[in-house]
Amino acid sequence: MPESDRTTHFGYRTVAEDEKKGLVEGVFTSVASRYDIMNDLMSGGVHRLWKDAMMDWLAPRPGQKLLDVAGGTGDIAFRFLKRAPGAHATVCDLTAAMLEEGRKRAEAANMADRLDWVVGDAMDLPFPDATFDVYTISFGIRNVTKPEVALAEAFRVLKPGGRLMVLEFSQLPNPAMQWAYDRYSFNVIPTMGRVVTGDRDSYQYLVESIRRFPDQETFARMIRAAGFEQVKYRNLTMGVAALHSGWKL
């Protein structure tokens, strides 16, 4: 099938594969200046606990090289560097506006010599093979046109013995709880987005994209298919989000 005829999902819409990247970039350019505030409001601050749990499991070590893809405003990179003396972090994001917001944060100035900010695509990373010790992506892989390609790129840029960790919204195992969570997501979050950022549509997309993302077991199989071993996951807040871990061995 010609490239231009292939389709994918953008939330609940069907779009041409070659259009999705630009649509996602538009979403995050629109919300960049209020992205961190909205994360706190949408989750009641719980996203901070999830990211701390990610660091606890990851256990950053001194001198490691981190690649944080879809790293936006630097939340993961800053946490990593605070726990790992002498480590270095590269934040890679599709959206220049998100990276610019990250650079404005106080932590960025304090860690400037340990941080790089790079505009790049998760499906075509601008880095050589076997460059990084750790690859992280948080709330970003569901926005990638082909997550399996992004996982293959993660495997490529990791050194042997390197670790992948993905933090992403997921599926609750209890149908009644999932129903209640859906009511909140679809009724409250887009309205909150309109009030706080002036952009309802972007947050409608973000809610829909969560529902389109594979469940925990399916995504774990995708990670294994990319070549990773010792693949495990942990549910956070009963499965609202999940942490996935894999190793390049």
Image (tube, grey):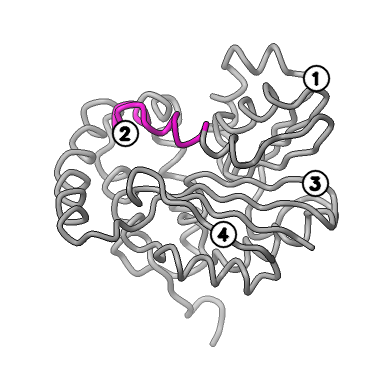
Which badge, 2 or 3, is on the more N-terminal residue?
A: 2
On screen, residue 5 above or below 53: below
What is the distance, in whole Å, between disc 4 and disc 1 at their CAs?
A: 33 Å
Tell me, for residue 9, which label it has, or none. Answer: none
* The C terminus sits in image quarter: bottom right
- List x then y, in percent, for residue 73: 55, 29
Asked if the stretch drawn in magenta spans residue 124, the answer is no
Asked if marks 2 and 3 touch (Cβ < 8 Å), the reply is no
Residue topped by disc 4: 232
Nearest to viewer (mark 2 / mark 4):
4
Q: Specify the segment rendered in magenta.
A: 38-52
Q: What is the three-letter code of the residue carrying label 2? A: Ser
Q: What is the three-letter code of the residue carrying label 3? A: Phe
Residue topped by disc 1: 113
Tell me, for residue 43, which label it has, or none. Answer: 2
Q: What is the three-letter code of the residue carrying label 1? A: Asp
Q: What is the three-letter code of the residue carrying label 4? A: Lys
Q: In which quarter of the image is residue 26?
A: top left
- How packed mark 2 is, by other alpha carbons closer than 10 Å (few <14, some 14-19, many 20 or more), is few
Secondary structure type for disc 2: helix
User: What residue appears at the point 77 percent right and 52 percent down from the top-left corner?
Assistant: 162
Foreground of the two, 45 or 231: 231
Nearest to viewer (mark 1 / mark 3):
3
